[in-house]
Amino acid sequence: MLRVGLLTVSLAASSLSASTRTQRPPGASSGSLGLIGGVIVDASSNAPVPAAVVTLTPAGQSAYQAGVRVLTDTSGRFFFASVKVGEYTLTSAKPGWLEGAFGRHRAGGSSVPLAIGDGDRRAGITIEMWKPAVIGGRVTDESGDPLVGVAVRVFLQHYAAGRRQFSFKARAITDDRGVYRFFDLTPGDYVVVIPAAVTAEPAAFRLQTETPRAYLQTMTATGAAPLSLEPATGVSGTNGPLISSALAMPQMPASGGAWATYATTIFPSATKLDDAMVIRATSGSERVGVDITVRMTPTYQVSGVLTSPEAVPPGFHAVHLLPADAADHPLFDVATAVTNAAGAFTFYGVPPGQYVARVVRTPLPGGRWRLAQCGGTGAIPFVCVTSGGPDPPVVSSDPLMFAEQRVEVADDHVRDLTMSLRSGYRLTGRVEFEGPAPRPTEEQLASIRVRLERADGQTADPAGGFDPTQPGLVSPDGTFATPSTMPGRYLVRAANLPKGWRFKDAVYEGRDVSETAFVLNGDVSGVTLTLTDRSTKVDGTISQSNGQADERAQVLMFPVNPGAWVDYGRTTRRVLSTASAAGKFSFPAPPSGEYFLIAIPPDLNEDWQDPAFLAKAASLADRVSVSDRQSLTHPLQVRRIQ
């Protein structure tokens, strides 16, 4: 049961009333004299936020299980007493608001841990909260009539690994006026999409007592956009495949010639992502009039067969047709098809254009873990992993299989497309240790995870499902092998390292492939992954122009070479950002080299991975040299980038 108390307290530095009602965090004892208090405020007006739920959670634990909660009073104040020594996360939440957190000074930005020592009295904390942004509009057909019950999706534009990307954020359904409204958005830049992908499936698919494994394995959004099948709305011809559309079909596909139907449309009326209009949404504002007209367009069929080196034909495999200019970062399928028992498939509703047909069958999870469809009421269903037990997933020996074929559609159907599944590629090597510390035990070696990370920073599932990319394990003799993986540009990462060891590099053919991307187009062997017991850091103080400490700044560190500002993955050690904590900053030192180091106000940190932003920051930043043999301490003054 949720423990909530409504508090009215005075946070003056003098004394605290003995009658004040408080909440004691888990593990606290009568001798733990730490105290935490403060106020929750509206970031835009600095007005107090009453009746906000403030949660104090020990670092590394779940707020749902270990967090203690209190309600702010009418002045927005909160108070926790008898706080045990340690690090905590401190967050605030209220319906109609975006979550606030200690050290967060931008909506959706990063936070910092709150450290409490013996007897610490932190009674002056201020946590900011933001009103969400709103985007709304109307969807009509070319005659101006409203389209009712249409699913509209909104995607947040952001930068990862120096490249523009989009992440799915929400779905809304139009009402009887054709009106939609997104009301709980983090401030940022968005594109609004009305998907109209047509899905075709063999009739036998619906007769299955449970969803075929092959279908789930090919719907994880690896290499494609996630799209779960809706109930079929028609049959294409006598005994033809069942078909459905993300947008209501105005008629059934023609038996020959073009089929006039709706195409995927992006605000204002674009059919390509490059032609979309980006919408700026700000905190507490409502962007209305984002109206979209969906037009009928002639479309065609693309049919073919999927083959496999396996003895059984690849039945019930989802085949995705993607725009060629967005195939590396797909937001939606132009069309989706499910193969029949013989591997045959047909795409419907394909407008003229350049496309990539792709199938990626991810490995099945091992142990007691299973693939399933997840998603609550109103959410987009996605493929997830479920289990009846607490054991972690076991790395599967099941190979990843993939097939890809470019397709051009002009003014006629495309027939006899042939796609052949083939196995993904593996990376093998060994782990070496640098330093005098005792070598890890076999049990510690087994905990290490070696993973291939896409250089462009793209995640596996923009709709919020799971990442099916499984890591490689380290054997007792120090060797490792990753599961088979799709071809592409990757970086090598190591995680779950034994205590006292950190990742230094991964060398292949004389270069560090943990920082410089390599092309995986076949099996790769002979990678040397080095762990070191040497620990170095970069730290310093942050001040304002008047010399006072700045507790709100964000610190950026990035290489001097602009060529390193792109394709560095999502967990790089060379392009870094950290929030100020009590006017100080600290993070593990990146690999040796020349870097720019700068402190900026938090409101400028939104797109810090944009190379254009880094170019501006470089002109004001300090230049520092980093060595893996010694730590670096460097004071910073906050700079505002124009």
Image (tube, rainbow, N blue to C red):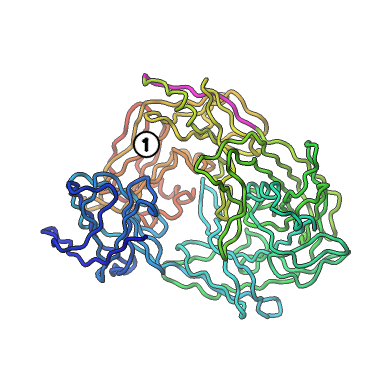
Please name the predominant secondary structure of the magenta segment in the image.
strand
Magenta stretch contains residue 435: yes
Q: According to the image, label 1 marks what residue?
A: 588
> x, y percentage for residue 63?
38, 53
Task: State the residue in front, 151 or 267.
Answer: 151
Would residue 537 appear left or right of 475 to someone viewing this image?
left
The answer to whether residue 508 is above or below residue 635 is: above
> x, y percentage for residue 549?
23, 50
Task: State the residue in front, 244 or 263.
Answer: 244
Residue 102 appears anywhere in the view: no
Residue 349 appears anywhere in the view: yes
Quarter of the image where one finds residue 253: bottom right
Residue at image position (63%, 37%) is 485
| Quadrant showing the N terminus | bottom left
Magenta stretch contains residue 559: no
The answer to whether residue 448 is above or below residue 171 is: above
Residue at image position (13%, 58%) is 13
> x, y percentage for residue 639?
33, 51
Q: Residues within 10 Å of mark 1 (few under 14, many from 20)?
A: some
Amino acid at dot 1? Pro
The answer to whether residue 507 is above or below residue 181 is: above
Would residue 281 appear left or right of 178 to someone viewing this image?
left
Q: Which residues are magenta?
A: 426-436
